[in-house]
Image (cartoon, rainbow, N blue to C red):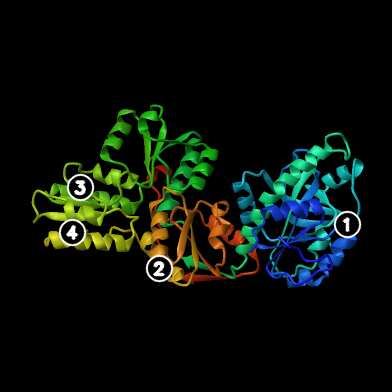
Amino acid sequence: MRRPPDRGGPAAGLLLCAPMRAEATGLRRGLPAAAGTVWHVGVGRQRAERAARSPTVAAADALAVAGIGGGLDPALRPGDIVVATELRADPNTDGGPAALAPPTLLVAALRRRGLTVRTGAVVSTGRLVTGAGRERLAGTGALVADLESAWLLADRGQRPAACVRVVADTGPLLRPGTLGQVRVALRALPLVAGALAEWAAATTVRRVLLASPRSFCAGVERAIAIVERALELHGPPVYVRKQIVHNTHVVAELTARGAVFVDDVDEVPEGAVTVFSAHGVAPAVRAAATTRRLSTIDATCPLVAKVHSEARRGAQHGANILLIGHAGHEETDGTLGEAPDRIRLVESVDDARRVEVDDPRRVSYLVQTTLAVDDVSEIVAVLRARFPDLAAPPSDDICYATTNRQRALHEVAADADVVLVVGSANSSNSRRLVEVAERAGAAAYLVDDAAGVDLRWLAGARTVGVTAGASAPPALVDEVVGALRGLGPQAVHERSDTVEDVRFTLPKEVRL
């Protein structure tokens, strides 16, 4: 890529500053032609300060510094990447450390390229430091030392800025292996440039829309509280059949506290404390738990329990029950188990067109609580056309939390270029939120957490919508919003569709 002369010239877009010529060469190899400009600014504080005052820097929309550096933490290895969260000058005469916006998304882009990445402070010094000088800087908590970054980015203002240094050495300079370590570090720079290009392309984001309600519902809060209380009362281990709710972070946190998640009760030691998940279980599971003399606590969401009750009631009255749901989902399996001879699963409009029943005049339907309202409406319309006497549930089976989150997101997605749904891949209600956003015209993606956000999704986007499934912790949404701030200044607006005040009581076994 053609670079501007070292005296500086206009460079709108990404300006990627490289102190050494070899660094600039490596970065140019990885930076797409249209992504920005690599500028060889020269080594040392004076050149860095001169470059920072140049028209080139003044014209840039996004600023980044990349190159090699000296590792201060002995755990670092040549080729490891340090992304700065803070820039320091040594000696510290320039107003104290300068924090950079959270680099979460840039870090994720680097890791997707197979690089080992850490985040922390980068300290810029007036000259190369060795021996005792490095030990002193390491004692301050800094990870890498260089000669330019703090001064190159000193006048960045509100513009998006990033600093990435590749560790070239972690010990005495000019030893026999140093040159080989430098080569290892330089080989990583094309990959660094590619990640920075993705980061710069996403710095167009200027507005974040938060859908409300989002995250935990009352049933999820109750289920998690049941496991927590069981651990307090009985101590670990407490066994949980299946995931208590469908979220990897919730499961990991409870596992760390002593919960043991199993696929079925036959994996639980006889007599052990066992919790049934929020998605409910079939009567056969309860019978197996009784046979093993397990001390069971039922965390089934009351709204799921309502569907089970409707299934039993319909079967007792001889109805042909059509359950609208997804095969293999734990909630569906539990409901089917209430009356396996009387219930047939309907997953799609095509299934609705094909399903056969013994008596077309005695047909009712039930619904998995986490489905998309629009999808269910289409299926019910087909069933009603085929079975005019089709009986609906006494009240809507799709739970209030699912409905509220879908409705709130629909309004946000209509104004967003991209929607991020926080939730795990096995969460039905989270996956339905992705579909709702896509139907509203936005590109939508399901992410477990901020690290799952791919910068390429955000390229050129101005407005990003954010929501979370009913099983996703609110803190994960905060992390995603914080990560988006690493793309530059943004306005964050919350759009509230309704206020949820539903609360469910805990079962007697865990009431304190």
User: Comparing marks 3 and 2, which lies closer to the viewer?
Assistant: 2
Compared across the picture, whether 215 is left or right of 136 comes to: left
Residue 303 location in percent, x, y? 32, 54
Q: Which of 28 and 293 is in front in this view?
A: 28
Q: How far separated are the C-alphas under marks 4 and 3?
A: 13 Å
Q: How far separated are the C-alphas under marks 3 and 1?
A: 74 Å
Secondary structure state at the residue bearing disc 1? loop
Mark 2 neighbour density, 10 Å: few (under 14) some (14–19) many (20 or more): some
Q: Do the residues labelled 4 and 2 touch (CB within 8 Å)?
A: no
Quadrant containing the N terminus is bottom right
Residue 157 location in percent, x, y? 75, 70
Residue 344's label in the rendered image is 3
Secondary structure state at the residue bearing disc 2? loop
Compared across the picture, whether 452 is left or right of 226 comes to: right
Q: Is residue 141 in view from this perspective?
A: no
What's the amino acid at mark 4?
Leu
Residue 383's label in the rendered image is 4
Q: Does label 1 or label 2 sit earlier along the sequence?
A: 1
User: Comparing marks 3 and 1, which lies closer to the viewer?
Assistant: 1
Q: How far separated are the C-alphas under marks 3 and 2?
A: 31 Å
Residue that protrudes farthest toward the front in the picture: 2
Residue 44's label in the rendered image is 1
Q: Nearer the viewer, residue 368 or 432?
A: 432
Name the residue beneath numbered marker 2: 440
